Amino acid sequence: MTLRVTNTLTGEKEPFEPRDPDSVLLYYCGLTTSDPPHLGHARGWVHVDVMARWLDHLGYDVHHVENFTDVNEKIVARVGEDGDSEADVARHYVQQVIEDMRSLNLGRAEVYPRVSEHVPEIIDLVERLVEQGHAYERNGSVYFDVTSFEDYGKLSNQSVDDIESQGADTEGEKQHPADFALWKAGGVDPEDIAEHQHPEAAPAEEACATAQTWDSPWGEGRPGWHIECSAMSMTHLDESIDIHVGGQDLVFPHHENEVAQSEAATGKQFAKYWLHVRLLETEEEKMSSSVGNYFTVADAVEEFGPDVLRTFLLSTAYTSRATYSDETIAEAEERWDRLSRGYERAVEACDDVDAYAKMTDESLRGAVDDARSAFEAAMNDDFNTREAMTALLDLTAAVNSHLDAHEQRDYQGLRSAVEVFEELGGGILGLAFGDDDSGDVSLAGDVVDLVLNIREQEREAGHYERADELRDELEALGVEVQDTDDGPTYRL
C-alpha cells in the first residue's frame, strides 16, 4: 500500500512521492524557546518522530531538521526570570527542550539549527529578495511585498485582499497592510514585550537592553520571524523539500509567508507536502503557554512516564482533535497497561517449558498477520497512529486468548507476536517494549531521592559523618551528588 498524506497545500489526501525516490527531506517548525515545553508541544514532537520512523521503515533515507527559535520578543520578556539576557534565557529553554525530548524517547533529528547561528544566511536571503524586487527597505527595516508574489495566500486559501494587516506598521512604512517584516531595525521596544512579561521578570527597558542585534546592509537590527525557517531549511536541506510539518496554528501567517518568501527567492516550490498537527485541547481551548492551561512535559513525564504519554498522544491521529483530561490520560494508562502486559505475557510464555515447536494455533498466527497488515495499512493511511495502536491492542487480545485457552503454547506464534510488538510498537510508535531499563531508571531516581532525604535528616541531627558516608556510597554507585543553597541535587 502506498503512503498517502493529507496535504494542506491541496486540501487533499494524496500519494506521497518524494523528489528523490530514495530519500526524504523533512523540516519541522520547532519551538520559540521562551517557556517550559508542554504537552501541546509534545503532541507535535511525538507525531513527527513517528512520521520519521515510519519513513525510515519504508526504506527512505530521512533527513529530519527541527529548529530552535532563540531570537524573539517573548524570550526577551523572560530576562531576569530565567536568565540575565535574551541569549541566556534561550539557552536555558533550549536545554529544557532537549531534556524533555530525550525523556519522551524521541529519535534525534539530523540537526537542530538555531536562529542566532544563521543570521548570515538570513541576511543573504533578504538581500536576494530585495534585489529581485520582492522586498523593500524602509528606515532600516525590510518588508516583503505580498503583491509581488502572485500565489500569495495559496496555502491558507485566502487572497491578499482578505488580509487586513500583518504586524505593526511603524510610521506607515509598509506599502500594503499585509506586507511582513523580513528584517526589523534596531532592538526590541519595551512595548513589544509588555503583554508577555511575568511579574518576576526584569523591568522592560532593562530586559530590552539585553536583546541581540546584528549588523546588516540596512543597519543594526534583528531578523523577522518568518524568514528564519526558510533560511534554516535551505541551509540544512535544500531550496525545495518534501515535507514541512508544523502546528495547525502556523498555517497563517507563518507558513504562508514561508511559502511566499522562499518561492519568490528561488522560483522553485518550497515544500511539496505541508502537514499540520492539530492542537491539543483542554476544556475546549488549545493548550498554550499564553493561556496558561498547560501541563509541562517534565511534570507529565514524572507523573505518568513516557510510555503512557506516548500512548496518550498517539491514540489520536495527528489530523484529529485531541483533548487532554483526567479521562483521556486514564484511558491511555489502561491501554499501555494492556499492551505492556500482553507483551510480557507473550515473552514469558515463549521462555516457558510449555511452549512447543509443533503446537500450532492458527487463530493466534492469523491474528499476528492481521495485526501487522492492519498496522502497516494504518501508517500508510496518513500516519494514522490511532488505528495502528488498535492493531496492537487486537494482537494483545489474541495473545491473551491463546494463553488463557491453551496449556501447551504455540512457540512460533508467540515469538511472531513478540516481534510485532517490538518492531512496530517499539520501533515505530517508540514504546518501550522489551526495554526493562525504563522502569529501573524511574525507580532508581525515587530511591536516590529517598536516600538524600535520609542524608539531610542525618545532617540536621548533626550526624555529619554518617551523612558523608551516605554520599560516598551513592557516588560509588554512580550517583554524583552536589549540595546547593536550595538543597542537594544529583546526576546518574
Image (tube, helix red, strand yellow):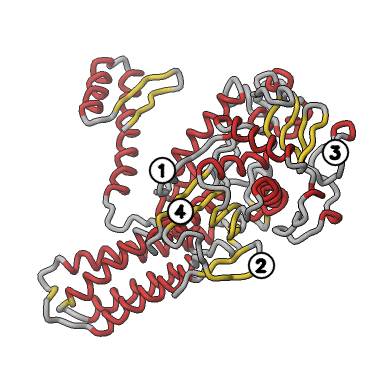
Residue shown at 50% from the left, 61% from the top: 18
Q: Earlier in the sequence, mark 3 or mark 4?
A: 4
Q: Nearer the viewer, mark 3 or mark 1?
A: 3
Where is mark 3, residue-wise? 174
Q: How far apart are marks 4 and 2 (CA)?
A: 23 Å
Give the image location of residue 443, x and y in percent: 31, 43
> Mark 1 falls on what kind of element?
helix
Sort mark 2 into few (<14), some (14-19) or many (20+) by Cα contacts within 10 Å: few
Residue 229 in which image quadrant: top right
Earlier in the chain: of badge 4 and badge 2, it is: 2
Residue type, numbered disc 1: Arg
* Rendered residue at 32%/78% (across/down): 369
| Label drawn at residue 102 | 1
* Disc 3/disc 1 C-alpha distance (Å): 43 Å
Measured as percent of width and height from the top left, residue 86 is found at 61, 25
> Can you tell which of label 2 and label 3 is closer to the viewer?
3
Residue nearer the viewer, 240 or 306: 240
Q: Mark 4 points at which residue?
A: 49
The disc, 3 or 1, on the residue closer to the chain's N-terminal end is 1
Give the secondary structure at mark 2: loop
Quick one: label 4 or label 1, which is nearer the N terminus? 4
Q: Which secondary structure, mark 4?
A: helix
